[in-house]
Image (cartoon, rainbow, N blue to C red):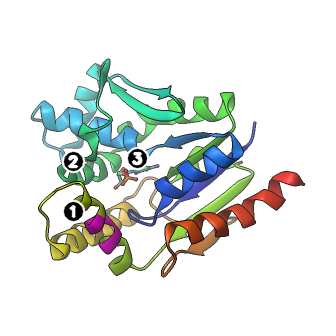
Amino acid sequence: MISISIDGPGGAGKSTIAKALAKKLGFIYVDTGALYRAIGLYMINNGVDLKNAAAVTEKLDEVKVELKYVNGEQRVLLCGDDVSEDIRKPEVSMAASDVSAIPAVRDFLLGLQRKMASENNVIMDGRDIGTVVLPNAQIKLFLTASAEERAMRRYKELIEKGKKVEYETVYKELCERDYQDSHREVAPLKPADDATIIDTTGNDLEKSVQVLTDFILPKLEK
Ligand code: DC
């Protein structure tokens, strides 16, 4: 099986680019952030203090997270319910970042991610895919862009969805999450030593997909 890891901070365009690439290559796209989001959502819905690692860890016993593919689109099931839309709410982003710093949560999701990669050719996006989840991935990328541009992309996405948000708030939350994700003790956000870093600042989506396709295709043909 072939694995391609795409790590990087929020808003770097990982998911949109990875989705387009997966389609081109006939690979399965695995959005691992969605798994952490599902756990964050469960903890919010059950009134668990997200900063209390012991409380979150205890509650994990009740959680069942599954990935399902419908017409090539990833759906996330939380205890049997499709929560693919609910996990995109802005408040779930920070909750996902909070629970993702808890070692038991990371362990809980590790097996599922590795199983997906052992059974399928995957493009997997996240924060620690190249460093921890799939250290033997054949191709490792680290996608980034300036914080201002990432926040602007997020802001536009939310506005397009009809959400009332301020750019300043989106920017502040993004920086907070970047800091939290890259400073946690377990599996922090960082490029693997053997990852290629690609900066998408100034690129539109089409251009970024092209840059990554040009990078990946020759490697797969070898
Ligand atoms: O990619 P995303 O914004 O949907 O991820 C939500 C949060 O989940 C992110 O802030 C950190 C966490 N995460 C992680 O710790 N490891 C991953 N592989 C993917 C996401």
In contact (CB < 8 Å): disc 2 and disc 1: no
For ligand 1, tell me if the residue under mark 2 lies within 8 Å. no
For ligand 1, tell me if the residue under mark 3 lies within 8 Å. yes
Q: Earlier in the sequence, mark 3 or mark 1?
A: 3
SS assignment for the magenta stretch, majority? helix
Is 162 magenta? The answer is no
Q: SS at mark 1? A: helix
> CA–CA distance between discs 2 and 3?
13 Å
Relative to 102, residue 61 above or below: above
Identify the residue shown where x is 54% and y is 49%: 19
> CA–CA distance between discs 2 and 1?
13 Å
Q: Earlier in the sequence, mark 2 or mark 3?
A: 3
> CA–CA distance between discs 3 and 1?
21 Å
Which mark is nearer the camera, 2 or 1?
1
Q: Which residue is mark 1?
A: 159
Q: Which residue is mark 3?
A: 33
